[in-house]
Amino acid sequence: MNNSCHLIIGNSGRLITGLLAGLLITGCMIGPDYEKPTVDSPAAWRIDVAEAQDLSNSRWWGQFDDPVLSELIEEALKSNKDLLIATSRLDEFLGRYGVARADLFPQVGADGSAARDRASESLTPLGPTIDNPDNIYQAFLTATWEIDLWGRLRRATEAAQAELLSTAEAMQVVIQTLVSSVALSYIDLLNLDRQLEISQETAKTRKESLEIFTKRHLAGVISNLELSQVKSEYYLALARVPEIERAIGQRENALSLLLGRNPAPIKRGGTIAELKLPTAPAGLPSDLLTRRPDIRQAEQDLIAANARIGIARAAYFPTVSLTGFLGTSSRDMSDLFEGHSKAWNFAGNVTVPIFTAGRIKGEVEVAKAIQQQTLINYQQIIQNAFREVDDALVDQDRTRETLDAQSQQVMALNDYAHLARLRYDEGYSSYLEVLDAERSLFNVDLTYTQTRADLFSALVNLYKAMGGGWIDLADGMTSP
């Protein structure tokens, strides 16, 4: 009897194995296979930077030669909350991929039980050989397996893998944005520091002038009109001080948040005048398709959306699954693992949709529409990437020209203010000419400082827009 059972199980196992192998070999993948869309890339950028170098794979922020900036970026990469959330999301989608992939394989479990029961003898008389109450002991291995004939599970795994890769690229987008945001905020702080210094120096100088002119007014040397003009210019410069201090405090708070800190003052390295100007990175428009994580993320989203069409279409076809168990069952614990206590079962199940009132068709249409939306989004992100690089190239090029012109203007206004003061002291002109010269110099000094900061910011934005291996280097700095 036992040999017969072994023979049946062995023959059945070989039969089922052969059947499954044939089904898997002949199984197909419903739905469209992914094909990379054709991208119309510009042949060249609008602005050609002659001194550009291929530095997109280096830690470009080191070119500023400010160790404090490098420390702040390193701290942000370890403590920024948005980045920590992105890291956790990556773990989440790694788990989701594991869940989707597991459906491709048989699911095996174990089940065991022990029970004692007594039947009513008044309803059904029991024979003398039947124990009442009775014991029963069972131990089984159970297995279920959906045969992926139409590729539904393989498409689901393909979509889950693409979503995992998309999440990884999204994390790199966070890193790309974080590094550039810390650099931009730090540059802005140094810019505001210099503007505060200019405003305080101007207010101090004008206060000294006001004290002198107040004495001269009391002596009857100057009119009330001239004194009022001097007062007006003093309070104009004085009003700029708290305005800039407010901006510094708010910028420090924003930068603290990027660093994962509570709002607090931010340490500085050098001044904005001591920052070294980075070299512009080089690269062709076609390079962006592989260098920017947001483009790679959009493509993975497109791959996932394309795979979901196959998942939806597979619902038109039968679902085939196998179930079975193998184990022992006995009324006596001592006989539980004896040969005559063995029990097994194999079964196949087929589920076929017959009438769904258009539900499957609707799901297919939804999947196709989402795929089209994702495709358009992919194309739009690429076009926006081209625009951001072109904008940054134009920005840094024109800002250099503006900075050169403003540098000459600052020199000219310094001469103008000096000569106006000499003319006033010699009695050749009124103090109104001195006030006009100093007012112009004050405004241009502030503007020149802002333009210099704009040039640094334009180069930061250019590195951000270009993407490249520097994001991978920054990613390697995120580990505590």
Image (tube, rainbow, N blue to C red):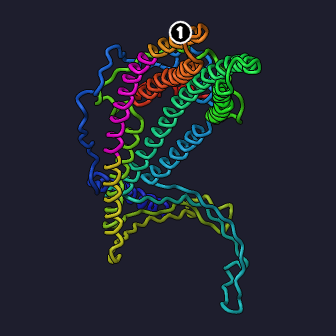
- Asked which secondary structure carries label 1, the reply is helix
For the point 41% across and 29% down, the residue is: 467
Q: Can you identify the residue that label 1 sits on?
A: 419
> Is residue 259 among the parts visible in the rendering?
no
Q: Residues within 10 Å of mark 1 (few under 14, many from 20)?
A: some
| Amino acid on which disc 1 is placed | Leu
Q: Is residue 352 above or below residue 450?
A: below
Q: Position of residue 325 (x, y in %)?
A: 51, 62
Q: Nearer the viewer, residue 231 or 320?
A: 231
Pick whichever, 272 or 415, lies toward us.
415
Q: Give me the residue at 31% from left, 66% from top.
A: 317
- Residue 336 occupies quadrant: bottom right
Closer-to-camera residue (341/105): 105
- Residue sitting at x 54%, y 62%: 342
Quick one: quadrant of the C terminus? Answer: top right
Range covered by the magenta-colored residues: 378-406
Asked whether residue 391 is drawn in magenta, I would say yes
In the rendering, at what x and y percent does residue 132 appear? 72, 79
Residue 257, x across and y down, in percent: 64, 36
Query: Whole-percent x and y of residue 157?
Result: 41, 50
Q: Classify residue 457 as left or right of residue 190.
A: left
User: Which one is nearer the viewer's eye here, 421 or 124?
Assistant: 421
Instruction: State yes or no: residue 375 in magenta.
Output: no
